[in-house]
Image (tube, rainbow, N blue to C red):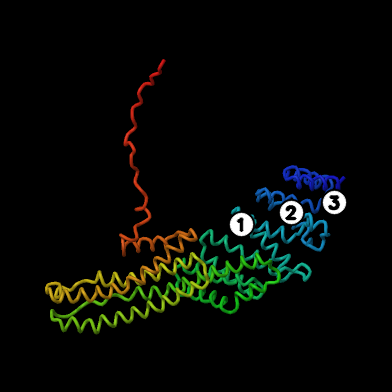
Amino acid sequence: MDEVLWNAALNFEAARLLGRAIRVRTALIERFPETSLAKRAIYLVGANYHALAFYERAAEYYETFAKKYPGEDEGSCDADDKKNGTCAIAHEALKNAVFFRIGLGQDDKAIDDANMFQRNYGPNASRKDRRVRDAAQVMFSLGQIHENKKDWSSVVEHYRSWLRRYAQTADPHQIIQAYVFVGNAYRNARDTVKAEASYRSAIKAWDKGGQRKISRLTEASDDEKARYMMMAKDAVSEAKFYAAEGLFRVFSRIKFPEYQGGRRLEEVNRWAQRDFKKWLEKKREAMVDAEKAYNEIAGLEVPRWQIAAASRVGEMYASFIDAFREAPVPKEIENDDELYGVYVDALEAQATSFEKPAVEKFEFCIITATKVRWFNEFSKTCESELNRLNPREYPLASELRGGVDFAYNSVSVPDPVVLSK
């Protein structure tokens, strides 16, 4: 009779009648609990709820199966089971349960399931059951709980602990991500020094063969490797961007030199050759360092970080333009037409030289954002800056939308309907 129920459930499942398959498998579990088919039915009911997106019910059945039969794995499946998708695998069940509990916001249950996974399949499990790579993935996922709560100290503690335990066995992309998440937690806690150190660790992990290590993962399919590579590149791009932000702050802190002198042309020229030239050289050097750091992101080909980097580089060029055009005019110069003309013309000439590279960076930013449909605060900055530099050629998107024309401002009073005979 247990075989009859088992086969009936398979037929209902093949007909996509998952509700009936669940009812039949539930009857099998209740009436023949000691049979091997009932044991596997527990897992498959969880899989049915999983397919129906009833994640809490799926998690409950997955947890029940993993607790009662933690040693069940692929070795207990025959060829027909693999063909029909009826293998019951305890570690897969428990891994799914962890992810579902996290997604449902059931943090305590997620942590309990993850700790069970680590006990059953982690580094200290028996050699037969050990699945350290899977344990690393499961324990890594718990960091999301602390991130959702914005508990930055717990985020740092979690990923640092994870790195100590799994740095030698985890997938390369997750090692890189862990350093980035630690960096983000420090950044949110306003500790830029420790944040930048974590970002540099992420970059170092990538530079020391991260791409090669991902391509050599023997337990991952080609699709998984491609996904892991994308995740690693995204994390490294983020690390490079925020590492470059430190250089951007150095650049931003170099302020335009105030003119202090008399009303003679010689004094203006002396200021230009001494204070102004020194400021310009220092500012340029800082921009070159920051731009070089931002440009490293381009080779990783992650559009959202390419957009952010281009926006920042464009901002640096634009800040030169603003510094020249908004520089305060000393009273000694403002009251002298000749000196005023020399002073303003010199600044305008410098400002003009920065317009083209600024526009190029902002254009690249907008074109990339449009191509990949990724719009955020950085793409908005690019749009507004382009409009500010050249409003005629680069109108804002809102300006391109036509106004409401040929519309009545008030509702008309309906007339009575006249029916013709």
Classify mark 1: helix, strand or loop.
helix
Q: Earlier in the sequence, mark 1 or mark 3?
A: 3
Classify mark 2: helix, strand or loop.
helix
Classify mark 3: helix, strand or loop.
loop
Place of residue 414 in the rendered image (x, y in percent of width and height, measured from the top left): 36, 26
- The CA distance from mark 2 to mark 1 is 18 Å
Q: Are marks 2 and 1 in contact (CB under 8 Å)?
A: no
Place of residue 383 in the rendered image (x, y in percent of width and height, measured from the top left): 38, 61
Amino acid carrying label 1: it is Ile
- Closest to the observer, 38 or 235: 235
User: Can residue 293 be seen from the camera position used here?
Assistant: yes
**Residue lying at 60% horizontally and 53% vertically, measured from the top left:** 104
Q: Earlier in the sequence, mark 2 or mark 1?
A: 2
Q: Is the residue 282 above or below the residue 140 in the image?
A: below
Query: Mark 3, residues whose alpha carbon is within 10 Å: few (<14), some, or many (≥20)?
Result: few
- Closest to the observer, 410 or 162: 410
**Residue lying at 72% horizontally and 43% vertically, measured from the top left:** 19
Q: Is the residue 218 above or below the residue 7 in the image?
A: below
User: Can residue 194 be seen from the camera position used here?
Assistant: no
**Residue lying at 68% horizontally and 57% vertically, measured from the top left:** 96
Q: Quadrant of the N terminus?
A: top right
Q: Which residue was labeled with disc 2? A: 64
Amino acid carrying label 3: it is Glu
Q: Quadrant of residue 259?
A: bottom left
Query: Which residue appears farthest toward the front when viewing the image?
Result: 421
Q: Which residue was labeled with disc 3? A: 34
Q: Which residue was labeled with disc 1? A: 102
- The CA distance from mark 1 to mark 3 is 32 Å
